[in-house]
Image (cartoon, helix red, strand yellow):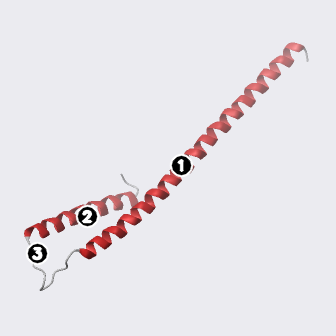
Amino acid sequence: MNERDHDADEVEQGVDEGYDIAAARARQRRVNATDRAQDAYTRAYLSAVDLVEEINELLGDVPAPSETFTPNWEHVGSLVEVTRRLEALVAFLTRVEEGER
């Protein structure tokens, strides 16, 4: 092998190594992005669970229909709005669960 062929082989090897380094860096970025997405998803999931528990507690504080509670139209309107928003949330979660969006 002459000097010129040897230099060409070194350049080719360097290009291959450079590609391997670039590919490794790209893989690491994807892994890092996946890890960040998993962490963010976990935080969001736990936050959603906490909010559902809080909603359940708040609804428990809403007076239930009874002989001792006389609702007015403000009560009705508030409960209708809560129901509307919960229905929208259920519809959204159903679409997400089915893979739509």
Q: Name the residue type under label 2.
A: Glu
Of circles 2 and 1, the one toward us is 1
Give the number of the mark in front: 2 or 3.
3
The reply, left or right, for residue 61 in relation to residue 73 is right
Q: Residue at x 16, y 80 (%)?
A: 65
Number of callouts? 3
Residue type highlighted by circle 3: Pro
Which quadrant of the rendered structure holds the N terminus? Answer: top right
Q: Earlier in the sequence, mark 2 or mark 3?
A: 3
Report the front residue among 37 and 51.
Answer: 51
Label pair 3/1, CB-CB below 8 angstroms: no
Amino acid type for the residue under numbered disc 1: Arg
Q: Residue at x 83, y 17 (%)?
A: 7
Q: Which residue is mark 1?
A: 36
Instruction: Point out residue 4 in the picture as x, y percentages from the top left corner.
Output: 85, 13
* Lower position in the chain sequence, tag 3 or tag 1: 1
Element carrying mark 3 = loop
Read off the residue under disc 3.
Answer: 71
Would you say the residues marked 2 and 1 are in contact, meaning their CB atoms lie under 8 Å apart? no
Q: Is residue 64 left or right of residue 71?
A: right
From the top left corner, tell me how far across and down residue 43 is, in percent: 47, 57
Q: Viewer-proximal residue, 57 or 98?
A: 57
